[in-house]
Image: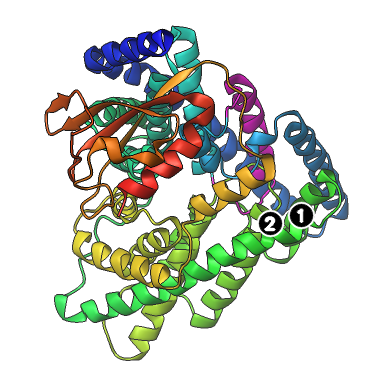
Amino acid sequence: MAQKQESAAKLLKRGRGYRYSLILEGIGVGAAGGLVTVLFRVALEKADAFRGMVAGLAAGNPAVLAGWCLALLLGAAAVTLLLRWEPLIGGSGIPQVEGEMQGALSQVWWRVLLAKLLGGVLSIGAGLSLGREGPSIQLSAMAGKGVSRLLGRERTEEKLLLTCGASAGLAAAFNAPFAGVLFSLEELHKDFSTDVLLSAMAASITGDFISRMVYGLGPVFDFSEIPPLPLRQYWTVLLLGIVLGLVGAVYNFCIGKAQDLYSRVPGQFLRTLLPFAAAGVLLVVYPAVLGGGHNLVEQVSQEMLLRSLLVLFAAKFLFSMVSFGSGVPGGIFLPLLVLGAIVGSACSQVFQGMGLAAPPQSFVILGMAGLFAAIVRAPVTGIILISEMSGSFTHLLSLTLVALAAYVTADLLRSKPVYDLLLERLLKKRGVRTEADGEKVLIEVPISHGAAVCGTPIRELSWLGDALVVAVRRHDRELIPHGDTALEAGDVLVLLCEESKSHPVYEAVTAQCKR
C-alpha cells in the first residue's frame, strides 16, 4: 500500500507542475515526428514517380513489365519478412496507437519505426491502394515514444507524448495542423484537457512547420477559389450526406469481411503477394486506381462522365479492400477521401442532370468530409481536415451539414467506427497483455452529460475494480476525493491503476462515464 501511495504521489506531483515542460517536450516530439513523416512522404513520392516511369516504359515492352513483376515479387517477400519481424506494423497503425493509449498493447518503438517506414514505402510505392496518413501517425507516435524513453518519462506522460506524436504525424502528412490536434484528441486520447491540448498543439505546429519547409505553404488540394453553395440548395447537401453514410457503412462492413477472407489464405507470404500481384495487373489494365489516389481527387473535380465515375469508384473500392484486407503496412485515410470525392462528383452529375447548379469541385470537398465522418466517426476532425486540405474555410456550414448527415446515417445503420472495429479485431487476434510489471498509470476520463455516474458518490463506484480514484478535476480545481464526493457532468475522473490492468479499467470507466 505504501508503495502504491508513493507512486500515486509521484505521478500527481509531476502532473501538477509539468504543463510548460510538456509543451517543450511536445515541440521536441513534433520535430522528431515531423522529420520522420516528411522522410516518409519524400520516399513515397520517389516511389510513385518511379512506378509512373515504369508504367510508361512497360507499354509494349514485355521485358520491362517482367522486371516490374519480379520487383513486386521481391517487394512482397520483403514486406512479409518485416511483418514477421514486427507484426504490429501491419495495417493502418492507428489502431495500434489506440491500443497503446488504452494499455492493451506495447510497441517496441525503434522496431516499429524502422519496419513501418520500409514496409510502408514498399507497399504504397508498389501501387497498393493505401494511404500515408495512418503510417505517418504511427511513425510519429513511435518517435514520441522514443523521446519519452530517452527522457525517462513515466508511462502516463509517455501516453501524452504519443498523442503529441500522432498530432505531428497527421499535421505533417497533410499540412493540416488543426486536424492533427483534433484527431489526436477526438480519436486517440479522447480527452480535451488543457495539458494535452497545449502539448498537442505545440507538436502539431512544429510538425507542420517542418513539412511546409519542404513542401511549401500551399494546401494539399487547391480549392480555395470555389464559391460556397447557395443556401437554397442545401437539401442536396443533406441527400449527399445520407448517400455517404450508406457508403460508409458498406465500407466498414467490407473491411471486416476482407480481413475475414484473408484469414483463410494460408501463409503470410501468400496474403501479402495477392495485393502486390493485383497491383501488377492493374498497372497494365487500369493504372488510375494505383496508389493512394492523390491525383484522382483533382481529376474527379473536373467534368467526368457519370459512367466513368461509377467504374472508377467500383475499381478503387475493390482494390482498396484487396490492399488493406491483406494486413500490409498502409492506411485508409487517403483512399477513403478519394472514394468520397468520387461519390461527391457523381452526385454532382446527378444534380446537374436535374437542372441544378452543382459544381463538382464543391461536391468533391463535401464528399471527402462526409465519407470521413461516416467511416471514422470523427466529424469535427473531418470538417477541419478537409478545410485545411482544400485551403478554404468558406464551406464550413455545408461541410458541417454533410458530416452530420453522414454520421447519423452510419450510426443508425449500427456501423462501428472503423478504427474501433480494427482495434477490436487486432486485440482479439493478439490477446491483451496481462503480465504485471509494477508500472502505474493515470487514466483520465471526462464525464459526459447524462452519463450513468452523474450524481453518484465515489464510494458507490463498485465497478472500479483494482483502480484507485486519486483526483477529480472540476473546472479549474482539483478535488481530493472522498467517499461522499458526488461526480458531476464535466468532471474529469483521475484513476491510478496497474498498467497491465489499464485496458479493462479504461473500458469499464468509459462505459459508465460516457453517455
Residue 268: quadrant of the picture: top right
Q: Principal SS element in the magenta part? A: helix
- Residue position marked by numbered label 2 in the rendering: 259
The percent position of residue 238, horizontal first and vertical second, equals 29, 76
**Residue 508: which numbered mark, if any?**
none
Label 2 packing within 10 angstroms: few (<14), some (14-19), many (20+): some
Residue 472 seen anywhere in this rendered image of the structure: yes
Residue 137 seen anywhere in this rendered image of the structure: no
Where disc 1 sits, the SS reads: helix
The percent position of residue 98, horizontal first and vertical second, equals 48, 39
Residue 495 located left or right of residue 90: left
Residue 493, magenta (yes or no): no
What colour scheme was applied to this rendering of the protein? rainbow
**Quadrant in which the N terminus appears:** top left
Q: Look at 50% across and 55% down and name the residue there.
A: 418
Q: Is residue 80 positioned above or below 409 on the image? A: above
